[in-house]
Image (cartoon, coloured by chain):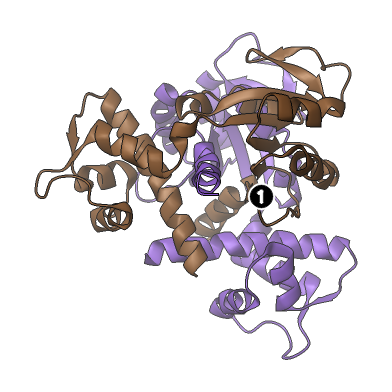
Chain colours: A purple, B brown
Amino acid sequence: MKSTTSRATIERLALYFRALRLAEEDGVQIISSDEIGKRLSIMPVQVRKDLAIFGQFGMKGVGYYTRELANEIGKILGLNYHWNIAIIGVGHLGGALANYKNFTSIGFKLTALFDKDVRIIGSTVHGVKISDIKNLKLIVKKREIHIGVITVPARQAQIVADQLVDAGVKGIWNFAPIKIIVPDHIHLVNEDLSIGLSTLSYHISRS
Amino acid sequence: MKSTTSRATIERLALYFRALRLAEEDGVQIISSDEIGKRLSIMPVQVRKDLAIFGQFGMKGVGYYTRELANEIGKILGLNYHWNIAIIGVGHLGGALANYKNFTSIGFKLTALFDKDVRIIGSTVHGVKISDIKNLKLIVKKREIHIGVITVPARQAQIVADQLVDAGVKGIWNFAPIKIIVPDHIHLVNEDLSIGLSTLSYHISRS
């Protein structure tokens, strides 16, 4: 459970970060753990517990400076590094991710798009030109891509993952509905859209 | 932490379900908790613990009948109900979800698509015609939609959620990067694509 718990904590930190940024936009300069919890439907004690893991933030009985806390959490999450990301497979999902504004807003930079379909190679999505997947290694190295996002069909996912590892990415975000194998030094996050829907199904079928 | 744990358990059940279906396709008729764990990078003891919550499956020292266990987990997750889903907002993400084959494969039926853009209303995505969002309530009732998927911009998400609740859906799957409020009897799952990327960032920045 350890790893699950810590993963859950990191995911909550990401939620706090976004909630704080939104609060900042609302002009909220000082925010309490109760308010953060309320905005996310998370228990305030959980919020305080999570933040305590990483240091002493805020002022007892007063709250946290919204921007300061957001910046601190952003640093904890490494969002201050402005990672370069590449999307491999510019189909429906890849195209949707390329146009997903939130990535930029939390500091990720879409630096390259790859596909093998000659009909779309050369065209531009969200200001980034689609490159031939044949040039993946060259371009990933040249543009210093840190994260590769895999949105190709399941049967091609492992091949693409191997190419990304070979090209020197640090992390892979896999949307293909299949388990891919990567070396220990590569960080892998599997995004499975069927999980959210299954969770919903579980609860609805019980109501 | 209780709710986090149970949510994590349900998410793992969904992973088991998919792994078992894939194993079935591979022709695996009997599978051990070790093998399930190996396919998902989850500790076998965790797999056994999760399954034990819902009943006594499998044969001591032998394993589980792949299909039987998949069906059992499918029932636990309510995937045997074939929920009708509607996607509201057929932009990049909505279009990607409409074309996401895995939903059908786990038993969800895309029954309606809605948008307010007259330029796309009437056109067809994945065999489903895009309807005018003005007719949401009527169509949701008529086609017995159980789940509404919100893929509209953040500022329109709450309005759409209210319309879905009013139309009688049981659950909402929200992709808009904003917290929406729904009555207690409505099940809400928020999908936040920036979380996965932030988790990756957290680990990469530490390596």
Give left or right: position of A35 versus B80. right
Q: Chain of mark 1?
A: B
Q: Please provide percent x and percent y for residue B2.
A: 48, 68
Please give the residue where the numbered disc 1 appears in the rendered image.
Answer: B186
Q: Residue at x 27, y 27 (%)?
A: B24
Picture quadrant where residue A67 is located: bottom right
Q: Can you see residue A79?
A: yes
Task: Please tell me whether mark 1 sits on a helix, a strand or a loop.
Answer: loop
Which residue is at the far left?
B61
Picture quadrant where residue B193 is located: top right
Give left or right: position of B120 versus B147. right
Q: Is residue B9 above or below residue B14?
A: below
Q: Residue at x 32, y 40 (%)?
A: B72
Q: Please provide percent x and percent y for residue B41.
A: 32, 48
Q: Please provide percent x and percent y for residue A65.
A: 79, 77
Q: Residue at x 27, y 47 (%)?
A: B37
Mark 1 neighbour density, 10 Å: few (under 14) some (14–19) many (20 or more): some
Which residue is at the far top?
A119
Q: Nearer the viewer, residue B192 or B11?
A: B11
